[in-house]
Amino acid sequence: MEKQKLPSANSSLIMGILSIVTACCCYGLPGLIFGFIGLNMAKKAKATYEANPEQYNGMGNVEAGRITSIIGLVLGALFTVYLVYMLSTGKFTEMIEQQKQLIEQMQNQ
């Protein structure tokens, strides 16, 4: 009997990768969302594999998805805490103004 691909194995890996990328690029919140989704998919895929291990392959993708989801969750949490700090101290608007000035300087060159 030929082994089947484990359902949600690739999806959990994709969600884990997306959680890392969006945590770093989108101020954390999307990274948290994708991380939770990826972790949930990895948990379901692992339960499916453990119920009938001789029928499925692809457990490596599940573990990689789980690990990348955890990394994305941690990065997302750190960026979210940093964003809350920046917003509460008023430094966020200063940072945005500095970025605008840099963009204007680059455009004038």
Image (cartoon, rainbow, N blue to C red):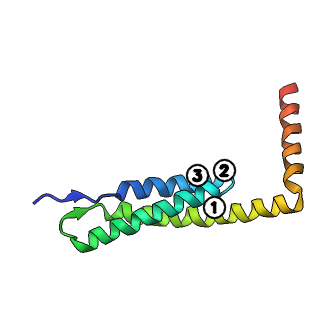
Q: Residue at x 50, y 54 (%)?
A: 17
Measured in 3D between alpha carbons, the distance from the residue under mark 1 to the one under mark 2, in whole angstroms, is 9 Å
Q: Amino acid at mark 2?
A: Cys
Measured in 3D between alpha carbons, the distance from the residue under mark 3 to the one under mark 1, in whole angstroms, is 10 Å
Residue 39 percent across, percent down from the top left? 46, 65
Mark in the foreground, 2 or 3: 2
Q: In the displayed image of the protein, which residue is found farthest to the bottom?
A: 50
Q: Amino acid at mark 3?
A: Val
Q: Secondary structure at mark 3?
A: helix
Picture quadrant of residue 54: bottom left
In the picture of the structure, the residue carrying the numbered disc 2 is 26
Left or right placement of residue 81 versus residue 18 in this view? right
Q: Are marks 3 and 1 in contact (CB under 8 Å)?
A: no
Crowding at dot 3, Cα within 10 Å, few <14 / some 14-19 / many 20+, comes out as some
Crowding at dot 2, Cα within 10 Å, few <14 / some 14-19 / many 20+, comes out as few
Crowding at dot 1, Cα within 10 Å, few <14 / some 14-19 / many 20+, comes out as many
Q: Residue at x 60, y 54 (%)?
A: 30
Q: Residue at x 45, y 53 (%)?
A: 14
Residue 79 percent across, percent down from the top left? 70, 61
In the picture of the structure, the residue carrying the numbered disc 3 is 21
Residue 58 percent across, percent down from the top left? 30, 60
Image quarter (top left, top right, bottom left or bottom right) of the C terminus? top right
Q: Residue at x 88, y 62 (%)?
A: 89
Image quarter (top left, top right, bottom left or bottom right) of the N terminus? bottom left
Q: Secondary structure at mark 1?
A: helix
In the picture of the structure, the residue carrying the numbered disc 1 is 76
Q: Are marks 2 and 3 in contact (CB under 8 Å)?
A: no
Q: Nearer the viewer, residue 10 or 41?
A: 41
